C-alpha cells in the first residue's frame, strides 16, 4: 500500500480505534480517567499530525491523494474501502482535528468531576473519526457509515448529563429530526449508486444521469443536508442541543455534524451543477435559514442559544454560496467559521463555568474579572459579524461577492434564487452585528453582578448542576484557557490565508478584493453594531432586545416553528401511534388471545365430557344415535 493509502486509512482509523478502546474503560475516577484523557487527546493529536502529513504529500504532488481496495460485493456493486482527498478536503480534515484536540484538552478540566468522563472522551474520539471518514471517504457507502456514526455519537453526547431533565429530550429530538432527513439521504445515495452501478464517488460523479432522475436524487440528498446542517425546516434540533456539555457544542457547531451537510454538497457539487432545480431549492433553503437564524438570535437570553442560532444562520451562508455556484466560498467560510465558533463556544463555557449561569440577564461587568475571555469574545464575535480584518470578514466577503455575481445570470442557479441569497446575506450582516454587539455588552459591560452561591443572581449552571462558582469570576485554568487562546489566532488571522497563493489555489478562491461591493456590507455591519450600542447606552442596564417590541417573543421562540412542527407533525404521528397501538392491543392481540381462550374453553368441554359417569355417557351415545337416525331418515325421504 502506498504512503497515501496508509496515512489516509489512519486518518479516520486512529480516532475510531482509540474511541472504541476508550469505551472499554469503566467510568471511574483515578487511573481510568487519566487513561481516558490520554486516549482521547492522543487520538486527536495523532489525527492532526496525520492530516498535516497528508496535506504536505498532496501539495507536493499537486494532485488529490487516492487509494482503495475491495471490501464487499452487494448485488453486483463492489463496495470499496477508498480514500480520496485533495488539498481542500485536507484543510477541512485539519480543522476537524484541531478543534477536536482543543475540545479534548479543554474537557479534561471542564468535566473534572464528571464520573462519566471516560465514555465521554471515547465518544468524542468516535465523533471525530466519523467526521474524518465523511471528509476523506472515496466511496459513498463509507461516507454513509461515517454519517450514521456521527448521528449516534451526537445522540450520546447531547444527552451526556443525565441529571438534566432537558438533556435526554434534546438528544432524542436531535436524533429523530436528523433521522427524518437521513431517510431522504439514504434513498438519494441508493438511487445514485443503483443508476451509476458503482458506489465509488468518482464513478457516481462521472455517470450521465437524466435531468429529472438526478434532480429527484439531489433533492433527497438535500433532506439529509437540512437535517445534519440544521437548515430550514429541519433546524429545530440545534438550539435544544445546547443541553449537551459546552465542549460538545463547540465540536458539533464548529467541526462536525453541521459542517457535514455542507461538505457533502461540496463533494458532490459536480452533480448539483447539472440541476438548476436542486440549486434553486438549496438557495431558497439558505435564504430562509440565514434570516431565520439571525433574527432568532437577537432575542435569546441564553448565551449558548445565541451562539446556536448564529450557527444556523452562518451555515445558511455556506449553503447559499453553494447554491450560487461558489463551493470555494462555502468551504472558506466553513473553515473560518470552525475557528471562530469553536472559540466562542469554549469561551462561553469559561463564562458559564465561572458565573454559574447561562443567562445574559444574570451577567455583566465580566470584562474586568475575565480579561482573556473578554478579548477572546471580542475576536470571536468580531469574526462572526465580519469585522475587518478578522477571518469572518474575508470569507463572508467571498460569499456576498459570489451571490452578487450570480444575480447577473449565466450561472446554473436561476437569477431570482441568487437574488434571494444575496439580499438575505446582506440583511444577515446587519442583524448579526446587532446580536453580536448585544451579547458582548450584556455579558462583559455594565455593572458587575454578585456571582457565586451567596449572590442574588446565582443559578445552577446549565452544564454542570453540581458546580458552584467562586464569588469573584476569573479566567479559566490553563487547560481551559490555552485552547481558547490558540483558537483566537485562526479566528483573527485565517482570513488572510486568502492572500496565500497555495491556499487560494487549493480552495479555488477568486483573488481577494475590496471594491464597492464591500462597502454596503460594511455599512450594514456598522449600522447593526451601532444601533445595539446606542440602545445599550441610551437606557443603561436595559436589554437592547426590548427595542424589538412584540417581535421579541416571536424571535425568541424561533418563529414558533417548533410549535408548528409539533402541531402538524408530532401530534398527528403520536395520534397515529396511539391508533396503531390500540388496534394492535384490541384487535390483533384480542383475536390471538380470543382464539386461545376459545380453544381452551372447547377443550374444557370435551374434557368434561370424557369425565362423564357411565350412565351419562350411555345417555349421550343413545342421544347421538337418535340424532344420526333422524338425519338418515330425513335423507332417505329427500
Image: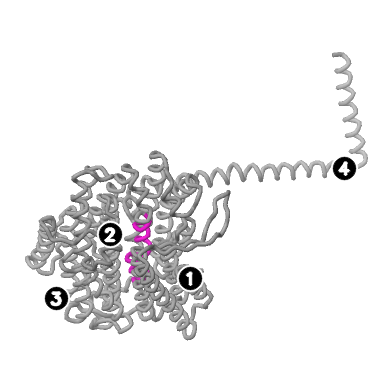
Q: Is residue 624 visible?
A: yes
> Could you tell me if the residues under marks 1 and 4 are in contact, i.e. CB atoms within 8 Å?
no
Measured Cα–Cα span from mark 1 to mark 3: 57 Å
Secondary element type, mark 4: loop
Any mark on residue 6, and which? 1
Q: Which residues are magenta?
A: 244-264
> Which residue bears the numbered disc 4?
612
Nearer mark to the viewer, of 3 and 4:
3
Secondary element type, mark 2: loop
> Which residue bears the numbered disc 3?
447
Mark 2 or 4, nearer chain start:
2
Measured Cα–Cα span from mark 2 to mark 4: 96 Å
Residue 445 versus residue 529 in the image, above or below: below
Mark 3 or 4, nearer chain start:
3
**Residue, x 21% and y 51% (percent of image)?**
403
Crowd around label 4: few <14 · some 14–19 · many ≥20 (10 Å):
few
Query: Where is residue 127 shown, x and y percent of the image?
Result: 43, 67
Mark 2 or 3, nearer chain start:
3
Nearer mark to the viewer, of 1 and 3:
1
Quadrant containing the C terminus in the rendered view: top right
Secondary element type, mark 1: helix
Magenta-colored segment: predominant secondary structure: helix
Nearer mark to the viewer, of 2 and 4:
2
> Could you tell me if the residues under marks 3 and 4 are in contact, i.e. CB atoms within 8 Å?
no
Residue 250 counted in the magenta span: yes
Crowd around label 3: few <14 · some 14–19 · many ≥20 (10 Å):
few
Query: Where is residue 310 shown, x and y percent of the image?
Result: 25, 61
Mark 1 or 3, nearer chain start:
1
Measured Cα–Cα span from mark 3 to mark 4: 97 Å
Return the residue nearer the eye: 62 or 289.
Answer: 62
Amino acid at each position: 500500500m502506498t504512503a497515501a493509502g496508509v496515512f489516509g486509512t489512519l486518518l479516520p482509523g486512529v480516532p475510531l480505534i482509540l474511541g472504541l478502546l476508550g469505551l472499554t474503560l469503566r467510568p471511574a475516577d483515578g487511573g481510568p480517567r487519566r487513561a481516558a484523557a490520554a486516549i482521547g487527546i492522543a487520538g486527536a493529536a495523532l489525527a492532526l499530525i496525520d492530516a498535516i502529513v497528508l496535506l504536505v504529500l498532496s501539495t507536493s504532488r499537486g494532485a488529490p491523494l487516492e487509494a482503495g481496495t475491495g471490501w464487499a460485493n452487494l448485488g453486483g456493486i463492489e463496495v470499496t474501502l477508498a480514500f480520496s482527498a485533495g488539498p481542500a478536503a485536507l484543510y477541512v480534515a485539519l480543522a476537524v482535528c484541531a478543534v477536536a484536540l482543543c475540545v479534548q484538552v479543554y474537557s479534561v478540566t471542564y468535566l473534572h468531576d464528571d464520573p462519566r468522563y471516560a465514555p465521554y472522551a471515547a465518544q468524542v474520539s468516535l465523533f471525530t473519526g466519523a467526521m474524518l471518514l465523511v471528509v476523506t471517504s472515496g466511496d459513498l457507502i463509507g461516507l454513509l457509515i461515517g454519517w450514521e456514526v456521527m448521528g449516534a455519537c451526537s445522540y450520546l453526547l447531547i444527552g451526556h448529563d443525565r441529571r438534566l431533565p432537558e438533556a435526554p429530550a434534546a438528544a432524542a429530538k436531535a436524533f429523530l429530526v436528523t433521522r427524518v432527513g437521513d431517510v431522504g439521504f439514504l434513498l438519494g445515495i441508493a438511487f445514485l449508486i443503483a443508476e451509476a452501478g458503482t458506489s465509488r464517488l468518482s464513478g457516481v460523479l462521472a455517470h450521465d444521469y437524466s435531468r429529472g432522475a438526478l434532480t429527484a436524487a439531489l433533492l433527497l440528498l438535500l433532506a439529509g443536508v437540512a437535517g445534519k446542517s440544521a437548515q430550514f425546516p429541519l433546524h429545530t434540533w440545534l438550539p435544544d442541543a445546547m443541553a449537551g456539555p459546552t465542549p460538545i457544542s463547540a465540536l458539533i457547531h464548529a467541526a462536525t455534524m453541521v459542517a457535514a451537510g455542507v461538505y457533502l454538497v461540496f463533494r458532490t457539487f459536480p452533480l448539483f451543477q447539472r440541476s438548476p432545480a436542486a440549486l434553486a431549492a438549496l438557495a431558497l433553503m439558505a435564504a430562509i435559514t440565514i434570516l431565520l437564524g439571525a433574527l432568532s438570535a437577537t432575542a435569546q437570553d441564553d448565551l449558548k442559544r445565541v451562539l446556536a442560532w448564529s450557527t444556523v444562520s452562518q451555515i445558511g451562508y455556506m449553503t447559499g454560496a453553494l447554491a450560487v455556484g461558489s463551493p470555494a466560498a462555502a468551504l472558506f467560510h466553513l473553515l473560518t467559521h470552525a475557528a471562530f465558533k469553536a472559540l466562542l463556544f469554549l469561551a462561553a463555557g469559561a463564562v458559564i463555568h465561572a458565573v454559574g449561569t447561562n443567562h445574559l440577564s444574570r451577567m455583566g461587568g465580566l470584562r474586568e474579572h475575565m480579561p482573556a475571555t473578554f478579548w477572546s469574545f471580542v475576536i470571536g464575535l468580531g469574526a462572526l459579524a465580519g469585522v475587518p480584518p478578522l477571518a469572518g470578514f474575508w470569507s463572508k466577503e467571498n460569499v456576498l461577492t459570489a451571490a452578487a455575481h450570480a444575480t447577473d445570470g449565466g450561472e446554473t442557479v436561476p437569477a431570482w434564487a441568487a437574488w434571494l441569497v444575496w439580499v438575505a446575506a446582506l440583511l444577515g450582516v446587519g442583524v448579526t452585528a446587532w446580536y453580536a454587539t448585544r451579547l458582548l455588552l450584556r455579558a462583559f459591560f455594565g455593572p458587575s453582578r454578585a456571582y457565586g452561591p451567596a449572590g442574588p443572581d446565582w443559578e445552577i449552571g446549565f452544564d454542570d448542576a453540581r458546580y458552584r462558582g467562586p464569588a469573584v469570576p476569573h479566567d479559566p485554568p490553563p487547560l481551559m484557557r490555552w485552547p481558547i487562546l490558540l483558537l483566537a489566532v485562526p479566528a483573527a488571522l485565517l482570513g488572510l490565508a486568502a492572500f496565500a497563493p497555495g491556499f487560494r489555489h487549493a480552495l479555488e478562491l477568486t483573488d481577494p478584493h475590496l471594491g464597492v461591493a464591500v462597502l454596503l456590507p460594511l455599512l450594514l455591519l456598522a449600522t447593526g453594531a451601532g444601533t445595539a450600542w446606542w440602545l445599550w447606552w441610551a437606557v443603561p442596564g436595559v436589554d437592547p432586545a426590548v427595542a424589538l417590541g412584540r417581535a421579541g417573543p416571536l424571535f425568541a421562540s424561533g418563529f414558533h416553528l417548533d410549535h408548528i412542527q409539533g402541531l402538524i407533525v408530532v401530534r398527528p404521528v403520536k395520534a397515529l401511534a396511539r391508533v396503531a397501538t390500540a388496534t394492535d392491543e384490541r384487535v390483533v392481540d384480542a383475536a390471538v388471545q380470543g382464539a386461545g381462550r376459545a380453544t381452551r374453553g372447547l377443550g374444557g368441554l370435551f374434557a368434561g365430557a370424557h369425565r362423564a359417569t357411565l350412565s351419562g355417557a350411555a345417555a349421550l351415545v343413545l342421544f347421538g344415535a337418535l340424532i344420526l337416525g333422524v338425519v338418515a331418515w330425513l335423507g332417505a325421504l329427500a
